[in-house]
Amino acid sequence: MKILATVKRVPDPETSIKVKPDGTGIVTDNIKWVVNPFDEIAVEESLRIKEKVAGSEVVLVSVGSKVVQEQLRTGLAMGADRAILVVADDNVEPLAVARLLQKVVESEKPDIVIMGKQSIDDDSNAVGQMLAELLGWPQATFASKLELSGDQKSATVMREVDGGLETLSFPLPGIVTTDLRLNEPRYASLPGIMKARKKELKEIPVADLGVDVAPKSKIVKMEPPPKRQAGKKVASVEELVHLLHTEAKVI
């Protein structure tokens, strides 16, 4: 099998994020960048398929500037075979990312595409669904369990929904987006890190794919959430109920 897994560069969740004074974005100085956690899960699941199905290949793909090589090398160190970077210096919106990935998929012809359900920076949760529509492929989102048939011609996905679990089956090729409970990503070993330096990382200029990546929307303003206000002490249950009714207005 050939498995295509997507990787996005995002700020470390442990990083303290500050908004620029003019509200146009976040301050990127001194920020640690990592692989999007949901994409790590996608890479891990791809590697587990490779370990089960002999002769499989895991190909990573990302869209971004050349600094994204660092995150792709992380995926290669985990065990992926090669990587593709679509070089785009400006921020690319979800639909444009989906169209770029469509071109890569049409070229690589993978049996399955595994993606994080969303990135933790903009939380769009849109690229996987858009890519499935552009390709005309079946999709299963928010996967908490993924199983392939014995002949690798179909897949079964379990996903968590309100009030229970939903199981979907579909023929391959198809697209799966991963949720947190799917697996626990492995750490890159020292031998893996050394091998990653020699693995293929192909760069494709965004202009070569013939996709219009001009933004269709504009961030008007970005601002941090308001500071949490101090709590109140109450002398009785009656006072608590009164404040919940008159101030908090939750009852």
Image (cartoon, helix red, strand yellow):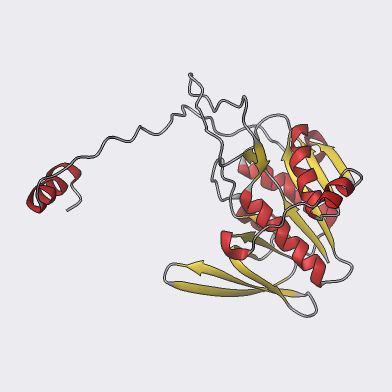
Nearest to the observer: residue 19 or residue 194: 194
Q: Which residue: 50% across, 73% down?
A: 165
**Residue 93 appears anywhere in the view:** yes
Where residue 176 appears, as percent x and y from the top left, is: 66, 62
Picture quadrant of residue 181: bottom right
Is 58 on the left-hand or right-hand side of 135?
Answer: right
Q: Which residue: 80% across, 44% down?
A: 73
Where residue 88 appears, as percent x and y from the top left, is: 74, 33
Is 238 on the left-hand or right-hand side of 66?
Answer: left
Vertical comparison of 208 with 175: above or below: above
**Residue 210 appears anywhere in the view:** no
Where residue 120 appears, as percent x and y from the top left, is: 56, 45
Nearest to the observer: residue 71 or residue 177: 71
Dividing the image into 4 quarters, which one contains the N terminus?
bottom right
> In this view, which residue lies farthest toward the right?
198
Nearest to the observer: residue 131 or residue 12: 12
> In this view, which residue lies farthest toward the bottom?
150
Where residue 148 appears, as percent x and y from the top left, is: 72, 74
Looking at the rendered structure, the number of numbered marks drawn on it comes to 0
